[in-house]
């Protein structure tokens, strides 16, 4: 009997150790450079998974073990909130951003993003790189802006839809697409592209990056969220081109 009890204790120990693993963050792909730097100032180091907000939200819905969700728009945070999968009192609208039109660094043309603009001649028989326009926040913002400016119909059949905004950035950086729509912070992080123009703020819904603890978050995840909302993290985010927002 004593031997059986000893075996049982040995079996439980690894499970307890596993429960005390690192805080897991699911974050929008566009946050990578800034969030990696911010997270480096917090110990113990969290484990961060980057992807499109849409993909991450659905993974959380399916039971993925995330402690903190950092979305690139309000819609996907609302999606989890409606399913009672985040801690509502922890939710904070943390950052803002801009969307921009980019081209490879060696391109030389100029363009004004104003009503009636036509991007089709610049694209020719190639493609406009964007994140998925139906699900990924950067793609949704970009499509809304093009629709407002009257440019969507001219390019809708010329769009190369990437799984996230960083993948769209890569298409332009490699010269595989002559134009792309990404966040200003993405363009700043990639030396192989240049910003052709910034989309007017009133051409698309406000760009808001909210963060929240998930319903299953470890207690120590609260400390990381506090770190993300602090002055030190704010300075890093702003250095990377984000704008800080105040929680409602």
Image: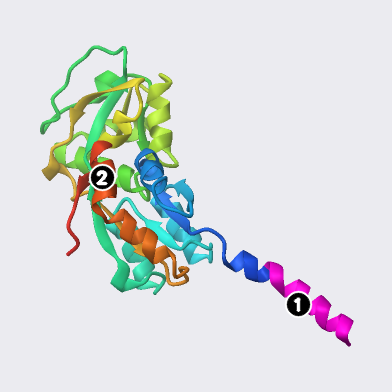
Q: Which quadrant would residue 108 be assigned to in this image?
A: top left
Residue drawn 28% across the image and 58% down it: 74
Q: Is-magenta flag for residue 153? A: no
Residue drawn 11% across the image and 31% down it: 114
* Nearer to us in this view, 86 or 175: 86
Q: In this view, does 225 lie above or below 140?
A: below
- Give the SS element for disc 2: helix
Give the Cα separation between the discs numbered 1 and 2: 54 Å
Q: Which quadrant would residue 236 be assigned to in this image?
A: top left
Position in image of residue 156 (x %, y %): 31, 35
* Nearer to us in this view, 29 or 21: 21
Check the picture and name the quadrant holding the N terminus. bottom right
Check the picture and name the quadrant holding the C terminus. bottom left
Write down the region rendered in magenta.
1-14
Residue drawn 36% across the image and 55% down it: 70
- Give the SS element for disc 1: helix
Whether residue 143 is visible, yes or no, is: no
Q: In the rendered image, which residue does mark 2 sit on? A: 141
Q: Which of marks 1 and 2 is in front?
A: 1
Q: Which of marks 1 and 2 is nearer the N terminus?
A: 1
Position in image of residue 92 (x %, y %): 26, 62
Residue 235 appears left or right of 189: left
- Density class for disc 2 (Cα within 10 Å; few <14, some 14-19, many ≥20) is many
Q: In the rendered image, which residue does mark 1 sit on? A: 9
Numbered badge on residue 164: none
């Amino acid at each position: 009997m004593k031997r059986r009890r000893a075996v049982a204790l040995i079996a439980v120990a690894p499970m307890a150790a596993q429960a005390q693993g690192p805080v897991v963050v699911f974050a929008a792909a566009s946050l990578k450079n800034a969030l990696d730097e911010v997270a480096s100032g917090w110990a113990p180091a969290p484990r961060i998974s980057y992807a499109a907000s849409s993909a991450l939200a659905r993974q959380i819905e399916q039971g993925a073990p995330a402690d903190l969700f950092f979305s690139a728009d309000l819609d996907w945070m609302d999606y989890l909130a409606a399913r009672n999968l985040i801690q509502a009192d922890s939710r904070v609208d943390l950052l803002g951003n801009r969307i921009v039109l980019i081209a490879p660094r060696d391109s030389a043309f100029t363009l004004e993003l104003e009503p009636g603009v036509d991007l089709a001649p610049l694209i020719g028989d190639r493609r406009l790189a964007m994140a998925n326009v139906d699900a990924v926040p950067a793609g949704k913002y970009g499509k809304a802006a093009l629709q407002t400016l009257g440019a969507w119909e001219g390019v809708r059949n010329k769009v190369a839809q990437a799984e996230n905004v960083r993948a769209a950035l890569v298409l332009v950086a490699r010269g595989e697409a002559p134009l792309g729509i990404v966040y200003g912070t993405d363009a700043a992080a990639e030396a192989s592209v240049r910003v052709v123009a910034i989309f007017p703020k009133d051409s698309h819904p406000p760009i808001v990056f909210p963060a929240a603890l998930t319903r299953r978050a470890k207690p120590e995840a609260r400390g990381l969220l506090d770190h993300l909302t602090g002055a030190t993290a704010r300075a890093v985010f702003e250095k990377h081109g984000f704008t800080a927002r105040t929680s409602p």
